């Protein structure tokens, strides 16, 4: 038996497993002090299911409150508690289930919201929204939590949301990487990857040089050291910012042109002269998708090809990304996706390896550009566009070298999988802006200078720790300080949380409202002869999207819309002697294939049926659309 056949068989089994959602049963809670649980160590410190809880942040809520508020961030356990509560509170429109497990065995919760009385979720147009793929980019998860609450609490009160839930399905996954989020919110450690051990510095060791909280304040800040030796002066690449010469804000320059060296807080555990270059994890779930995947750094044996840091051993090597992709392939009814990150405020989409005009169908690109503008109308982000060009060249020059910036490829990226492989509208939006609310110095760049000014003026200086002298065990006299990495750099202070979570959620909701929507305009049953009937169905797509993008048609992720008649099998048995004969169409399967219904388009089809009996005949006419849903009407022939 060939290896390719074995792989295909395994792949199909996996898809089947992920397509069958089981009734929700709350999994056993993790006991963080359970030494029998699976864990691994970094520098002798356990983490994983049994890591030692070192610190609790005032910005984070660790135990569910009576009311869900967005003036603190929420742990995975708190989010899951709310999802369980909502599943019990709204059983008519909510299904909650564990879609898979993380690397360390934590459950990944997912929710389906739809009115069950109006049909199955898989028989309706659908949208999928996800947060928490990057462990430290927790604002994205908060946006999913906000959206979930908003939809559930407004169902039955808001006419548009009620119509959405009655006619569509919304899939919500607040935490795709619960291991990383737990590590981020329960310890001083910070990262954006999974916690799978990874050889970041290619020295054959895994996670051997993580950051350390040297001053014991629970936060990994920066270390700055004034260059003293000739070797240090050759490497020095920071100066005091010339436009803010209070001695606090730093500016990066070319190596050898600076006065300071900057490190993240920690020591050189492996003694290689570099600090904290191989911390916990390093594998990036947003580089692990199958579309345009490239090997991780070091994986190109020629030394001349493209590689992608954090890509993983192979596409979908990680359980978190594998669960997502296999589940989505079993749910081709999804037209709209947003899988979100932080911290460049941008509506981010495909392509990631070429210009939009080079690879996207013009009709699809026009729709994407409409969505870009729809997003900006809610968020007012500075940018919306593709990864390869818009994201890579959002600033014209490199602020350190002065060189012009050029388009730059990103491989194994979610938005590329979403459009080129899955044929959907798929964004990977970036929330938060490192405090750079406006361009205070008018240099055309939203950078640390702008964040520092905003922090001083509007945030009471809470986002920046003034430099404090510290006696480093290896470097000697240094200073520790800089921006708060968790609640200013990667994510905003709690006072900003709801604003960013809400406006992004409202954009996602607006995209869901654009889903294709097929409505039956007219069903006519006309007797043309004594025992012959013409059945005519007319329908329209009143939604904001077609039932298939051009790319979806190309990759065959969707089938043509089709109309068929359904009668009891006993009525159609016997060919010429059957009580009911479908004369037209003459096709064996008696199905009319109608192409793909565009937005605003109306279509009509007719069947000719001969009835060889005097009794009243009941049946159904069915309109089937992969992304437009399943629609049936009763017909009576007499």
Image (cartoon, rainbow, N blue to C red):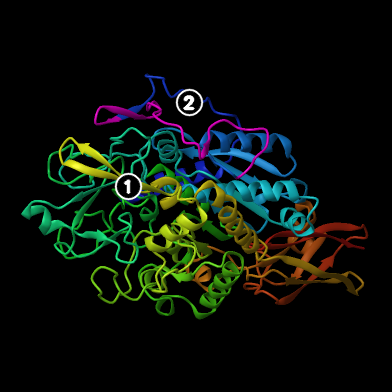
Q: Name the chief secondary structure element in magenta.
A: loop
Instruction: Return the residue nearer the eye: 584 or 310.
Output: 310
352 relative position to 295: left or right? right
Q: Residue at x 48, y 44 (%)?
A: 176
Q: N-terminal of the two: label 1 or label 2?
A: 2
Report which quarter residue 250 is drawn in: bottom left
Q: Residue furthest left?
A: 230
604 relative position to 410: left or right? right
Pointer 1 local density, CA inside 10 Å: few below 14, some 14–19, many at least 20: many
For residue 30, the mark is: 2
Residue 377 in view in this figure: yes
Q: Secondary structure at mark 1?
A: loop
- Name the residue tied to disc 1: 283
The segment highlighted magenta reads 41-70
Q: Residue at x 89, y 72 (%)?
A: 526
Q: Is residue 67 above or below residue 133?
A: above
Q: Position of residue 10 (x, y in %)?
A: 40, 44
Q: Secondary structure at mark 2?
A: loop
Q: Residue at x 61, y 55 (%)?
A: 502
Q: Position of residue 441 (x, y in %)?
A: 41, 71
Q: Is residue 196 above or below residue 617?
A: above
Q: Does residue 470 belong to the magenta stretch?
A: no
For residue 157, the mark is: none
Instruction: Return the residue nearer the eye: 249 or 557.
Output: 249
């Amino acid at each position: 038996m060939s290896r390719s056949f074995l792989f295909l068989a395994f792949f199909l089994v996996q898809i089947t497993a992920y397509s069958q959602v089981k009734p929700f049963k709350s999994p056993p809670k993790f006991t963080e002090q359970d030494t029998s649980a699976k864990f691994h160590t970094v520098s002798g410190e356990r983490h994983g299911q049994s890591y030692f809880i070192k610190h609790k942040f005032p910005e984070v809520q660790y135990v569910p409150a009576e009311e869900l508020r967005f003036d603190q961030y929420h742990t995975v356990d708190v989010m899951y508690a709310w999802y369980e509560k909502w599943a019990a509170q709204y059983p008519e429109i909510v299904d909650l289930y564990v879609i898979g497990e993380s690397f360390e065995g934590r459950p990944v919760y997912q929710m389906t919201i739809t009115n069950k009385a109006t049909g199955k979720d898989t028989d309706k147009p659908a949208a999928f929204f996800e947060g928490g793929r990057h462990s430290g980019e927790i604002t994205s998860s908060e946006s999913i939590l906000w959206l979930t609450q908003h939809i559930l609490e407004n169902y039955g009160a808001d006419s548009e949301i009620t119509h959405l839930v009655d006619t569509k399905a919304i899939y919500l996954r607040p935490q795709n990487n619960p291991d990383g989020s737990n590590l981020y919110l329960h310890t001083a450690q910070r990262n954006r990857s999974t916690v799978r051990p990874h050889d970041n510095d290619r020295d054959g060791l895994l996670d051997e040089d993580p950051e350390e909280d040297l001053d014991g304040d629970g936060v990994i800040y920066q270390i700055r050291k004034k260059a003293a030796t000739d070797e240090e002066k050759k490497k020095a690449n920071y100066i005091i910012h010339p436009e803010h010469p209070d001695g606090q804000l730093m500016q990066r320059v070319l190596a050898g042109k600076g006065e300071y060296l900057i490190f993240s807080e920690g020591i050189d555990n492996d003694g290689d002269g570099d600090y904290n270059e191989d911390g916990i994890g390093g594998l990036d779930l947003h580089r692990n998708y199958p579309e345009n995947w490239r090997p991780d750094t070091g994986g190109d044996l020629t030394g001349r090809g493209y590689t992608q840091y954090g890509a993983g051993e192979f596409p979908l090597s990680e359980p978190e990304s594998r669960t997502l992709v296999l589940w989505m392939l079993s749910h081709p009814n999804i037209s709209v996706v947003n899988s979100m990150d932080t911290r460049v405020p941008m509506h981010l989409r495909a392509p990631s390896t070429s210009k939009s005009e080079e690879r996207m169908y013009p009709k699809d690109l026009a729709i994407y550009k409409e969505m870009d503008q729809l997003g900006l109308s809610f968020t007012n982000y500075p940018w919306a566009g593709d990864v390869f060009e818009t994201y890579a060249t959002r600033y014209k020059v490199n602020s350190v070298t002065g060189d012009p910036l050029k388009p730059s490829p990103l491989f194994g990226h979610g938005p590329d999988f979403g459009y080129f492989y899955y044929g959907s509208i798929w964004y990977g939006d970036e929330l938060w802006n490192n405090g750079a609310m406006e361009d205070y110095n008018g240099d055309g760049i939203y950078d640390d200078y702008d964040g520092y000014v905003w922090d001083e003026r509007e945030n009471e200086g809470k986002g920046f720790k003034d430099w404090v002298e510290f006696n480093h065990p290896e470097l000697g006299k240094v200073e520790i300080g800089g921006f708060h990495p968790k609640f200013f750099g990667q994510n905003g202070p709690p006072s900003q949380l709801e604003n960013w979570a809400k406006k992004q959620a409202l954009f996602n909701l607006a995209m869901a409202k654009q889903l294709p929507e097929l409505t039956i305009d007219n069903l006519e049953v006309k007797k043309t002869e004594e025992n012959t009937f013409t059945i005519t169905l007319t329908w329209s797509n009143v939604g904001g999207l077609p039932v298939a993008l051009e790319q979806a048609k190309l990759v065959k992720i969707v089938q043509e819309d089709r109309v068929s008649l359904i009668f009891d099998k006993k009525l159609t048995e016997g060919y010429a002697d059957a009580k009911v004969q479908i004369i037209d169409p003459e096709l064996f399967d008696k199905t009319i294939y109608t192409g793909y219904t565009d937005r605003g388009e109306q279509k009509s089809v007719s069947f000719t049926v001969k009835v060889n009996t005097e009794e009243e005949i009941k049946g159904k006419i069915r309109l089937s659309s992969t992304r437009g849903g399943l629609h049936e009407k009763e017909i009576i022939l007499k």
